Amino acid sequence: MASTHQDGGGTLRGLGIAGLLIGLFLIGVSFVAGKDAEHPRCDGKDMSSSDVCLSSRSGAKSYDERASDAEAASTWMLRIGVVLAVGGVGAVVMGGLASVRRD
């Protein structure tokens, strides 16, 4: 009779794959945010250097402020994405080793 209990290695591999996929997604999003840092937008429209963006969430922000915010967001998303992706690969490897040791 087959056991329905999943070993710790399988669980670790599953979490690793999830971490890897989320990390890769955040890395991709960071590149999109990086483009906003180069060419800030307000309500989906490109801003010029003299524009001020009025938003109910963030108030009034200049072109430079919007560019700076987008650059900071891009940097943090990239950092977190890399950590998750590397951690995910590590978890997949460790899960594989745990499964091999059980066999």
Image (tube, rainbow, N blue to C red):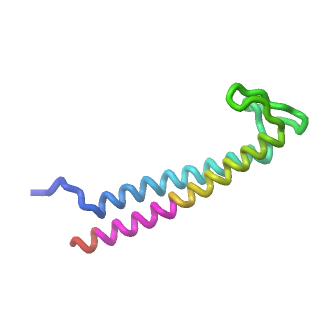
Q: Is residue 24 left or right of residue 54?
A: left
Taking the spot 89% from the left edge, 39% from the top edge, the residue there is 49
Q: In which quarter of the image is residue 81?
A: bottom right
Residue farthest along the bottom direction in this orientation: 101
Report the label total.
0
Q: Is residue 40 left or right of residue 23?
A: right
Residue 86 in the magenta stretch? The answer is yes
Residue farthest along the right direction in this orientation: 50
Image x and y of residue 10, in percent: 30, 60
Q: In this view, does 62 lie to the left or right of 44?
A: right
Image x and y of residue 11, in percent: 31, 57
- Reply above or below: 57 against 26: above
Image x and y of residue 2, in percent: 13, 57
Q: Residue 10 or 51: which is nearer the viewer?
A: 51
Q: In which quarter of the image is residue 96?
A: bottom left
Q: In this view, does 47 lie to the left or right of 35?
A: right
Q: Give the range drawn in magenta.
A: 85-98
